[in-house]
Image: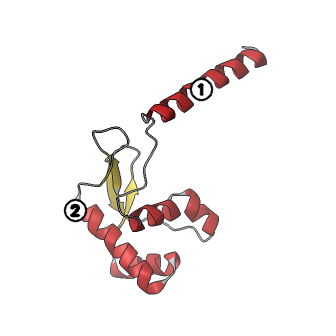
Amino acid sequence: MSEAELHVLRARLNGGIRSKAARGELRRGLPVGFVWGEDDGEILIHPDEAVVNVIRTIFARFAELGSARRVWLWLRAQGIKFPLSLGGASRVALERGQLSRRPCRACQSGLCRSLRLWQEPL
């Protein structure tokens, strides 16, 4: 394919994504602890109580300790496993995850977005 054809193809794909977003049908990955509902644009809290309890504990500790690293160290000390997304909409595993030492990496992994979504009422 020529470079011009690739440019046209990419523009059409982007147009399709924008069109879907305008209709409210675009579904992207959600932070751990959230799943897509049946209705368009509906976001629900994960149905697995173990995942929800761990996330609520994380936020309670974050409010108390004030640092994501301190929360992660507390989770390790208590032996509590962190919920990690396995790529599917509702596929979540409780595992010992690693928190990056660099804040920008934690934001890229969705931790900051998760903190913001869990603090806002649905």
Q: Is residue 99 left or right of residue 60?
A: right
The answer to which quarter of the image holds residue 53 is bottom left
> Helix, strand or loop at disc 1?
helix
Q: Is residue 105 visible?
A: yes
Q: Which residue is mark 2?
A: 49
Crowding at label 1, few (<14), some or many (≥20) Cα neighbours within 10 Å? few
Q: What number is the disc on residue 84?
A: none
In the rendered structure, which amino acid carries the disc numbered 1? Gly
Residue 54, image x, y percentages? 31, 69
Residue 33, image x, y percentages? 35, 58
Q: Residue furthest bottom?
A: 64
Q: Is residue 117 left or right of residue 103?
A: left
Crowding at label 2, few (<14), some or many (≥20) Cα neighbours within 10 Å? few
**Image quadrant for the C terminus?**
bottom left
Q: Residue at x 60, y 71 (%)?
A: 101
Measured Cα–Cα span from mark 2 to mark 1: 39 Å
Q: Residue at x 49, y 66 (%)?
A: 98
Answer with mark 2 or mark 1, whichever residue precedes in sequence.
1
Q: Is residue 80 visible?
A: no
Q: What number is the disc on residue 15?
A: 1
In the rendered structure, which amino acid carries the disc numbered 2? Glu
The answer to which quarter of the image holds residue 5 is top right
Residue 88, image x, y percentages? 37, 43
Q: Residue at x 77, y 17 (%)?
A: 4
Nearer to us: label 2 or label 1: 1
Q: How many marks?
A: 2
